[in-house]
Amino acid sequence: MKKLDRKQLAARVARDIPEGAYVNLGIGLPTLVADFLPKGREIILHSENGVLGIGPKPAPGEEDEDLINAGKEPVTLLTGGAYFHHADSFGMIRGRHLDFAVLGAFQVSARGDLANWHTGAPDAIPAVGGAMDLAVGAKKVLVMMEHLTKSGESKIVERCSYPLTAARCVDRIYTDLAVIDVKPDGLHVVDIVDGLDFQELQRLTGVPLKKPLIAA
Amino acid sequence: MINKFVASPEAALADVPNGATILIHGFGNAGMPAELIDALIAQGARELTIVNNNAGNADTGLAALIGAKRVRKILCSFPRQADSWHFDRLYRAGEIELELVPQGTLAERIRAAGAGIGAFFTPTAYGTKLAEGKETRRIGERDYVLEYPIHADYALIKADRADRWGNLTYRKTARNFGPLMAMAAKCTVVQVRETVELGEIDPEHVVTPGIFVHRIVRVPASLKRAA
């Protein structure tokens, strides 16, 4: 099987972001999606610290400490971009103005519950940031993550064992093995990586999957 | 004549009492009023309740205030960072209380305080650990959590330009919590890169109107680099 690497996964997500979309990319893996957005599509990236229209990374030496993204990395602003304060920024999120939020995850349940902020471990320092706002607020919530944990357990589960970020919020899951839609009647496989068939994907995944209409 | 300019960060913060609640502007280091925080550390107030998105980075600014054990409690959305070691150490030792608040709820609770709102319902965090014990309500097809304002004694803000009436502009993403925190405190103290004459800031470009600002200190960028 040809597992997608981080860049291929980011490119796979990027392919599905349409012209004109307003998109928030979460910290970490989702941020990588920006590098693979199809050229020629005008897509506006939002960052919850108060910016719309994020451009490419600045050249070395061109960083500005006052121009950063939610991951506190230096960014640039596209012509036409805008700055605003946090209440406006989260108004955009909670008020259902963002078309997509792309978020990382520890676990996603079969009904679309998301766990991505806290492992609940006794010694862990909890940190939530904007994750709960994005999960309830974006029109579509896309999750990108590895299909399996390091020890080989499915991260798509019947019921999240980690604390929830939000219930029933995930619309689509992108993993290094498959793309899966979360629908009211269950999990629908959209496509599978080369060299992996549906039966094997089902075996690796903790919960029942529905076959794609057209074989991938 | 109204003149909100104050000679120094030390003079601007001389009256902060022990136990004060202080909003500290900034998202990471963008907008963090480092010189005001240095003055607060030197001033010596203890048992503070601090509100910021984070819990300090490395060894300066908010991290230094926490490291100096002046903070009893912090309200923030994202304390855990690669370089939040001062907070991490005190939190694990049980020497600092944490109220973890989702980022948008943190912003809106501050805004609500400044805008005279008694409480508000938000869909964020419904059904999660962070809403445990809180009042909820179904409105239409959605479930909401009741959240209360965060009132403060002081706000410490870094802006870009100010005139003597306290009208402010910010710089890029260093705006973040500034306009909200300026509204929510009894005494709003601002450090700016540049002070200007009345009228030099186009009224259409004023981000925080002077009514929300009480004290202004100029901290030139060159001085900051030398520090």
Image (tube, coloured by chain):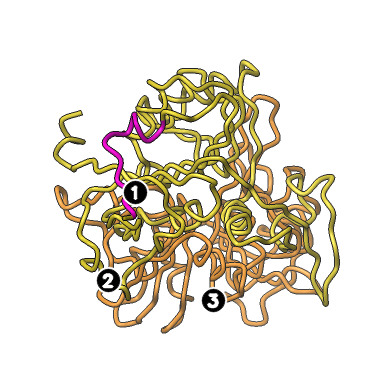
The answer to whether residue A147 is visible is no
Q: Secondary structure at mark 1?
A: loop
Q: In percent of the image, x 65 and y 27: which residue is there?
A: B97
Q: In percent of the image, x 49 and y 44: which residue is there?
A: B187
Q: Nearer the viewer, residue A160 or B223?
A: B223
Magenta-span inclusion, residue B6: yes
Is disc 3 surrounded by few (<14), some (14 to 19) or many (20+) residues within 10 Å? some
Tell whether B105 sits left or right of A54: right
Which kind of residue does numbered mark 2 sit on?
A: Leu
Look at mark 2 in the image and give the residue it sits on.
A78
Range of residues picked out in magenta: B2-13
Q: Chain in yellow? A: B
The answer to whether residue A199 is visible is yes
Q: CA distance from mark 3 to mark 1?
A: 43 Å
Is disc 1 surrounded by few (<14), some (14 to 19) or many (20+) residues within 10 Å? some
Which kind of residue does numbered mark 1 sit on?
A: Lys
Q: Chain of mark 2?
A: A
Q: In percent of the image, x 82 and y 76: which residue is there?
A: B141
Q: CA distance from mark 3 to mark 2?
A: 19 Å
Q: Write down the quadrant of residue B206 in the picture.
A: bottom left
Magenta-span inclusion, residue A1: no
Q: Nearer the viewer, residue A48 or A150?
A: A48
Tell whether B117 sits left or right of B199: right
Instruction: Give x and y (percent) for residue A91.
Output: 56, 68
Q: In percent of the image, x 20 and y 66: which residue is there?
A: B200
Q: Secondary structure at mark 2?
A: strand
Tell me the tag on residue B4: 1
- Which is in the foreground here, disc 2 or disc 1? 1
Q: What color does chain A have in the rendering?
A: orange
Look at mark 3 in the image and give the residue it sits on.
A99
Q: CA distance from mark 2 to mark 1?
A: 36 Å
Vertical placement of residue A65 versus B171, above or below: above
